[in-house]
Image: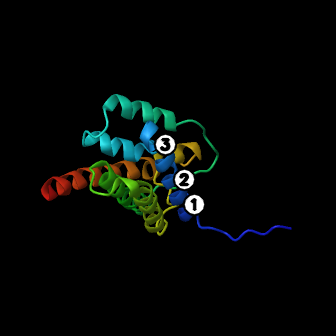
Amino acid sequence: MLQFSPVPTAVLAGLTLGICVYTMGAISGTHINPAVTIGLAVVKQISLKDAACAAAHCLVTRGTVTAADSGLIFAAEALGAFILVFGVSSVVFGKAPGPASGLTIGGSLLAGISVAAAGSNGVLNPAVAVSIGSISASYIAGPIVGGIVAAVLYRFIARDAS
């Protein structure tokens, strides 16, 4: 019988996102998380039309998991998404080296999930929340709020660093 050593979800998610960035980034922009897409649309790094299409594309399936709703979960999801979108923004605004984009973005997801997991399930993606049935303000709005704050803050910092 084969036995596999368990790998934490955050590590698998970070590696998967990094691979998606490297393989699909130049083709589609890798818009697989509405929190990221909406944050970048707010700072005009993606058009509203493309953001709407990307967000709609993410909402494909729905599972049966239920979700709690609390201030702690909202804050954890917002902080985790903040970390992710801050890393994505460093690539989008050209401050992180292009060849390191997958590592930067995948590592940001890993860090974001790891931090968020202290107070939530570490979903950080409204599309995933909907697809697994975790439909609550904490799991849907939390990441969007965190993503918008991160994109706006990064734009402000990047502008001053130019």
Question: In the picture shown, does residue 62 fall above or below 137?
Answer: above
Residue appearing at x 31%, y 58% in the figure: 96
Task: Tell me, yes or no, if residue 135 can be seen here.
Answer: no
Q: Give the side of residue 55 with respect to residue 156, left or right.
A: right
User: Which residue matches tag 2?
Assistant: 67
Q: CA distance from mark 2 to mark 3?
A: 31 Å
Three-letter amino acid code at the position of disc 1? Leu
Within 10 Å of disc 2 (Cα), the crowding (few <14, some 14-19, many 20+) is: some
Within 10 Å of disc 3 (Cα), the crowding (few <14, some 14-19, many 20+) is: few
Residue appearing at x 63%, y 44% in the figure: 63
Residue appearing at x 47%, y 43% in the figure: 32
Helix, strand or loop status at disc 2: loop
Residues 55 and 63: in front is 55
User: Which residue matches tag 3?
Assistant: 24
Three-letter amino acid code at the position of disc 2? Ala
Within 10 Å of disc 1 (Cα), the crowding (few <14, some 14-19, many 20+) is: some
Residue 1 percent coordinates (x, y) = 86, 68
User: Which residue matches tag 1?
Assistant: 12
Residue appearing at x 44%, y 44% in the figure: 25
Q: Give the side of residue 35 with respect to residue 6, left or right.
A: left
Residues 152 and 20: in front is 20
Three-letter amino acid code at the position of disc 3? Met
Residue 6 percent coordinates (x, y) = 67, 69
